[in-house]
Amino acid sequence: MAVDTLVRPVAVAAPAPPPARRTFALTAGPATALAFLLVAVAFAGGRAQAGWATEVYWAGQLLLVGVAGLACLLPRLTPAVRVGTLFAFTAAQFGIKVAYSPVNVKFADELQHWQTTLGMLDADRLFPTNYSLPISPVFPGLEVLTVVVMRVTGLAFFPAAMLVCLASTMLLTAGVLALVRQVTPRWDVVALATLIYLTNPNHGFFTSMFLYTTPALPLLALALTQVVSLLRRPDRPAGRVLLGLLFSGGVLVTHHLTMVVCVALLTAAALAAVVFRRAARALGALWLGVCAMTAAWVAFVAPAAVGYLGGPLLALLETFAHLGAARPGQAAAASTKPLTETLLSVSAILVLGGAAGLLGLLALRRRQWWVATLLIGVAALEAAIVIIRVVSPRGEELAGRSPAYVTLLVALVVALGLARLGVALRGARWHLGAGLALLVLFVGGITAGWPPYWLRLPGTYYAAGYEASVDAHTLQLGWWSREHLPTGGRFLADFGNQNVLGTIGGLDPVNSPVEMFYRPGFDWGDRSMVQALSIRYVVVDRRIVTQPPVRGTFFIGDHPDGLDTSGPFPAGSLTKFDTTDGMGVVFDDGVIRVYDLRNSRYAW
Amino acid sequence: MRGDRIWPPLAVAAFALGALLDLPELRVPAGLVLIFLAPGWLVLRLGRAPLAGWYRLVLAAGVSFALALASLLVLELFGVPSTAGAVGTLVAGLTAALVVADLVRDTPPAAALRRLRSPGSWPVPATPLRPLVAPVLAGVVTVTLAGAAWGISAHTERAAAARSFTQVGLVPVTGTQRAFTVSVTNREGAGTAYRVVIESPSADRRVVPVTLADGATWSQVVVVVAKGTLEVTVHGGSSDTPASHRTVRAVVL
């Protein structure tokens, strides 16, 4: 089938009477802002430990998706109203992310990128050392944008970082709209497919954070837009090839995993171009250019990326290699997630895969073979995510990063299917079904995404509990350490303090030797380990003796078999540091103590 | 001159003025436009790409992102430190160069200057005001609600995150074996009086009264003359801590 029939214009319905359109257009913005306000009030309630906070949170979220859903499903709305409401939805989602932590970044990965930014600001150069996330400085796109905003506008780090993230998330929505618009001129389909993307579990929080994924994703969407545009209309390709190279180059210097996805998708597109004899030269040139840039960047700037990405890729391959031997439910058994939340998370994936599969079957019936292939292909991709999630011991982690990429393809292909199959988005039954599907996608996206259910409302301190373990004590210790302790000093700490000291504290964290903490007294084995790993400091946060670890452990890294870490930390095991010969104490704030091992029994 | 041509030079001028006069109200919005929109917009204009308005805007933002990413890489390549002056000059200079290129692209420089000076070139809005009242009101309500949401979040986060505590540190003075800096930082949220007890080997116990404003730090260098343990205990202050005092110590071999 010729690819130039990829877009089949569909007659656009007559515009609605002005009052109905106008009423929705006038109320969509305030209603979206009200939804944001409700969630912000719920967060305030969470900080005050109010019982009503959870109900208000969900009311706000449901109002948010309700308005966006209506903007996609109501007939006869203008493209401007649909698109404007989607941008308002994106802004509200970002606002909710900022309202969660409106003064500082706290998530571990955000702190790691803050460290790279601090290093660049200190030295006025790129590629500083980052002990906590060594790969981050060689993919410095996020930090470059932040430093440029800080230097040009004079803003401090936090507002500059949030502006970069806001611009990135808005550009991502615009990029997805532009990408989907390449396959259909129907704005109702474009808006619906874009909203499907915006409900993916990563979008609400994770890809709005101060992470390198955040600015890389919109550039990926724009690079793909050029690719689809070339496939659709191959004439005069030079400008789009150049833009494709520019956007792919932006992805390349910003995020390793998005770079891999970009090269993989370009490879698939180039192969399709050869098979269909469509824009083969242009896409071949783009593919060659991107591969050359990638090879050069990895070879000369970021050789560590090979090893960094190798581990997760091997784990993924291992998952598929041992599918038969795996024990279903293994991952679920280790998870404390409520069953309803797990079911909602899986339902969201099944609804999306099911919708693509149903459209694929319809395409088969109509003998539209390549549309059917694409639709069934993305349905299979969604099924693979469910399998990885359930079967693999690291399923949550492996499947957790995929929606940002997979949903991009799903949204594009579903839009293509709806357009090619001439599905009219009209009628009460259709609206009810689509509305329910959007609701499941959105709620399932929240339950599958970040933050986890026990962290959904801020305000409660959890020892070693991600953002909830980063408070004034840990942050001020980080700044104190940056000023007073030698940069790169190696240390042991619990999860929260490790994240802060290993980033803004400027120290070098050591993972794994948790036995040294748990042992009731000094041990010669610990001495060997301290010397072998050049550990200088041990950080003890006394709050770990008061509550069990909400993540199942207080520490990062592997734990020895048989060690029970489920309860509060045994107080006696912490006092040994006060009684061991020669232990120095370089810091004490009444809650956290930092011990200096240099002249202690651990060191000689 | 058409409106889509006039705003990039205006953004450069506003940024230059804001930077020269140190006016954040001008520098911040103009700077953001120079980073996230103007360069891409001008590149696409120079490329004469026949694009729909909305799509041009999206691509312009994307190209600007990519150019902003390239800016520090270029500085790094030439070994130029990424100071505020260097980055600001590069970003504004790039847009200014693109503006000039755009001006001279179609017309000779003299004609371009005439166009710039022409008072008739400014677009005159012809929209009647009445239909705008409802959208403007809706916009005001939206911004007010969003502002309230942000205000509530920031206020409650600051209140909930407030902790009363005191940081005590004892670290060796760089390059020495027996000199240590003891520091006390008040994070109690109010002025606080402390009693600092310093016990040094082969020296008398010293008690130092210290009063610190919130956020202030007191520090002193202590030199140890003999082997043993230097111990500093700080009494006073809050709080939400299990211990009534904080103790730091250094072992001198």
Image (spheres, coloured by chain):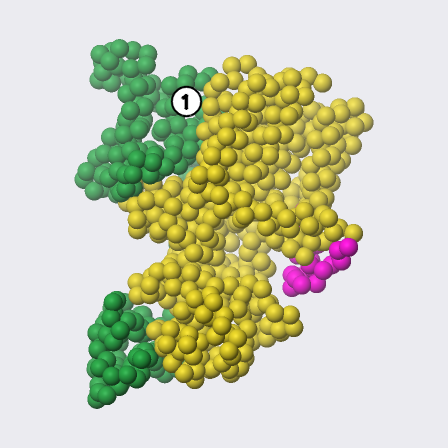
Chain colours: A yellow, B green
Span shown in magenta: A325-348
- Whether residue A278 is in magenta: the answer is no
Residue A303 or residue A438, whichever sits in front: A303
Residue A393 visible? The answer is yes
Residue B150 or residue B113, whichever sits in front: B113
Identity of the residue furthest to the left in this view? B21
How far across and down, in percent of the image, does residue B136 sit?
A: 40, 36
- Give the amino acid at mark 1: Leu
Considering only vertical position in the picture, is B36 above or below A275? below
Q: Give the quadrant of residue B99.
A: top left
> In screen coordinates, is B140 left or right of A339?
left
Q: Chain of mark 1?
A: B
Location of the C terminus of chain A by quadrant is bottom left
Residue named by callout 1 = B44
Q: Number of callouts in the render?
A: 1
> Residue at left 23%, top 34%?
B16
Residue A226 visible? The answer is no
Q: Secondary structure at mark 1?
A: helix
> Residue at left 74%, top 29%?
A372
